[in-house]
Each structure stands twice: as C-alpha cells, then as structure tokens.
Amino acid sequence: MTPLPGRGVGRRSLATLLCGALAAGGLAAAGVVALEPGAASASSHREAPLISGQPQYDNTDVYAFVSPDKPDTTTLVANWIPFQEPAGGPNFYTFAEDAQYDLHVDNNGDAQSELIFRYTFRTHTKNENTFLYNTGPVDSLDDPDLNITQTYDIDLIKLHRQKLVSKTKLADDVPVAPSNVGKASMPDYGKLRSQAVYKLSNGSTTFAGQADDPFFLDLRVFDLLYGGDLSEVGRDTLKGYNVNSIALQVPNDMLTESKEQPVVGIWSTTQRKDARGHWRQVSRLGNPLVNEVVNPQKDKDRFNASAPWDDAQFLKNVTNPELPKLIEAIYKIDAPDEPRDDLVDVFLKGVKGLNQPPSVRPAEELRLNTSIKPAATPKRLGVLDGDNAGFPNGRRLTDDVVDEALQVMEGELVGSKNDLGDAVDANDKKFGGSFPYLAEPTAGSRGATAKTDGNSVRNQLGDALNTSGVGGGSDTTLIVTSAAAGAAGFLLIAMALVWWRRRTRRTYY
C-alpha cells in the first residue's frame, strides 16, 4: 500500500493515542455506540454549487477555542468571502448589507440554538465621484481619505426550543477593519486593525474585518487526490489569500448552560432575503471540510439551507463516506468497514468524557468543552496527539484539521494504522497572541516592486510617464510627455467622430 505523505504521530494507532489522551486528563474514551437519529456535514471554501457563486454569503471556516491569554473566555471566529485576491480593487471586499451573519450556540446538546449572535452590516461612501476605495493614505478608521467604510450591529437572540425568549442589542455602528489595499494606502495596517477591536458592555470583545485566511491545506486534493500519484502535495494553496472575519470573545459563563455542563456546540450561518423579502438561510458551517468532501452533490445545497436538528437526513453520507473508497481506488489503501459508527461518535456527538454533552442529539456542530484549559504548547494534531484543548474539541487556528480528518477517515479509531496528511503543517503567517488572534491580511501591494530608476519606470509605463525629483528631496510628480498628450488627443478626437456618426445614423420611433 502507498500511504499519503504523513508526519506527526508516526504509524501508531490513532485510537490508542486518543484513549491515552483522554486517560491523561482523567477522562474515559468513548466506545462504539449504536446510531441515533442525526447526522453530518459542514461547509468550507466553494463547497456547494449555489453558494460558490455568492462569495459574500459563503462561510469558509469556523473556529472555537478557549482563549489562550484569557481562559475564562471563549473565542469564536467565523470567516466569509473565500479566495480574496489582495489587489482585487477598485471594489474591495465588504460584508453584504442584505445578510444576517449568525454565530449559533447550542449549550445543552439538543441540536438547537439557545444563543445567536447576529451581525448585520451597513456600507458608507464619502465621495461617490471617485472610483477609489481610498483617496489618500489612511491613518485611522475615521480618516476622510477612507472613502468606503462599513459599520455593524450585534444582536443577542436567546431561544428556547426554537422560540424567541429575548433579543438584546449588544453593539451599534461598530467600525469594520478595511481591506488592506497596500502599503501606500495603509502604511500602518496594524493600527487600523487595533482600532476595529471593540469591547462590549457585557464583557465580550468583538472584531470584524479582513484577515489572512487561517486555513492551511493543499487544495489540489481535488485533482484526483493530489494528482493521482502524490505529485501534488506540500503547497498551501490558500497562501496569500484573505477572508472577511467575524471574531467574538465571550465570557464562558455567558455561553454555557452551567458549570456542570461546560460543553457548547458552535456553527455559523448566513441568511439573505429572497425575492419575496423573506429571510432564507443560504450557508451553514460547523466542522471543517464535511460538506466539501462528505456530502455528495445532490445534498450540498440542501445542507446549506438546513439546521442541525434535521441532520438525520444526511446520516448515510457519514456512515458510508465516499472519500475512503476513492483513496482505495487510487492508492490501494483498504477502506474501513462500514457503517462508520466511529465517525458518528467523534464528529456528531463529541467524544464521551471530553466534549460530548449529556443526552446529546447527534448533529453537525463544532463541540467545545470550555472547562479544558488552553495548552501551553499546542500540538497541531490536537486530541489525537494528547492535546485535549485542540480539534475535535473545538478548533484552534493552529490545528491541522486536514491531517486529522484524513487519518480518522482512514480508520485510525477502528484500528487501521495510518499517518496520512497533505504535507502542509502550518499557516504561512504567524497568528497573534491576543484577540482577535488572526494574522493580518496580505496587502494588495505584495510582491516585487518596480525599480525607480528612470529607464525601468519608462519601460514599464510605455514612456507615457516621466518621473522627476526622485531622491532629490522634492515631491515625485508624473508628467505626461508631449507624445502621450498627442496620442491622448488623437484618441479623444477619434472617439468623438465615432459618437457623431452613430448619433447621425440613429433611428427614432
């Protein structure tokens, strides 16, 4: 058999590692449990046909972890608008105004929301007579040169068995961190990022804005599983792309049902108005990659419009997954026996004694035990490598969920030893040590810069522009040469003639 390239835990049984990790924390590992109603899925980058054409509404990833520097709080991060090219102006990346971006919390294991943190956005334009996102260097979020800005509100919605209990406004008109246009436009982007971190009256902290995409993996898995011959691994294909992020840090006692029941289930959704003006859910995400590689085409859009308490309809996709069969067909690694009760136990219920709530209803949620303290030195394979503070107990920014998912899919929990992975072990940018923890977005001015010697500039601009004063202490000005001016004048005359001829030929009815 030819395994995919692996690292980390070696060829040891993942089931043994999981049991050891739980035992070390005074916890008992879960055995195989009979299936109950409920099932699976989650979304990711361009994971379903309909949402792939609507990036402003497309959830990309959800993270939930006990805050490493404030362990009495939990940090939730949800991302939207995948594959943002940093230089993608003049219309850069904004949250949709006709959307409700929701963070859901299930704090009793019934697959229903008890809390919803709802973010809604508004866009503001200072000068509509320019095509520019900013008209000069931006020093602050209220800088008059920042032409396009956004603000948002947060509403806390409390529910009981899907019925409204209360709705409270937590924030009003909070500024959004802008897209990172480039070094000339935003010389100190870190300052703008810090100004977008806002403390709420209930002790929570919020952030919304652009960030480096924290998900690291080799997406060439979709080219017949890394090229069909392992020739396409080891490249972080999300390197250099940005996303729009919402981050919320909340005191643990505001999220959980009680100290005796510290486990919460987390997922995010996007709702937008349909043609009749009714709110409709168009995207949903909990665990990573599931809607991308577990749900077949016929179920992807339906899943995005569904809720966790209806996940029984997708159960067969989890108990009889397609991915192990594909790996067997291409790489001759035997697929584990079905039905895959091990996947139901770990990913739909949570691990018993670790992050499984009592009387749990199996559903696709990212489950986190908020009573487990952050690891001093996080391990990228999380629980599978003895680190109970990591995935699948929530998800930290540094967790290597692709390697973990591949190993579990290939049967580590049922005795099939493997050490599979995509050879991408970490994000290309370092994460922060304090809220919102996300790495700053890649700037639109990334890459090589043109040399400022006269010949180089003239060659690049077609000799239409000339620089003066470079290095002499005076302002650099761009002067149109007489040749360029003549060409521009000729072009205007030609355009005028074309317009006149079309006008004289026009027929009126």
Image (cartoon, grey):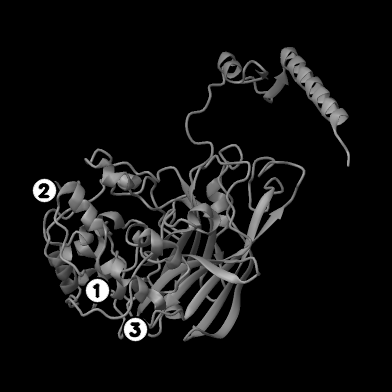
Q: Nearer the viewer, residue 435 or 274?
A: 274
Residue 92 numbered tag:
none
Within-10-Å neighbours for mark 2: few <14, some 14–19, many 20+: few
Please give left or right for residue 477 compared with residue 118 in the image: right
Residue 306 position in % (x across, y down): 45, 71
Asked which secondary structure carries label 2, the reply is loop
Mark 3 and mark 1 residues within 8 Å of each other at the beta carbon: no
Judging by the rendered image, the residue that carries numbered circle 2 is 1
Front disc: 3 or 1: 1
Q: Earlier in the sequence, mark 2 or mark 1?
A: 2
Identity, as a three-letter code, of the amino acid under mark 1 = Asp
Q: How crowded is mark 1: few (under 14 residues within 10 Å), some or many (20 or more)?
A: many
Q: Is residue 8 above or below residue 469?
A: below
Q: What element carries label 1?
A: helix
In terms of secondary structure, where does tag 3 sit? loop
Residue shown at 70%/55% (left/top)? 124
Give residue 314's position: percent from left, percent from top. Answer: 35, 70
Closest to the observer, 124 or 88:
88
Q: Mark 3 points at which residue?
A: 261
The label shown at residue 345 is: 1
Counting residues from the start of the chain, the first of labels 3 and 1 encountered is 3
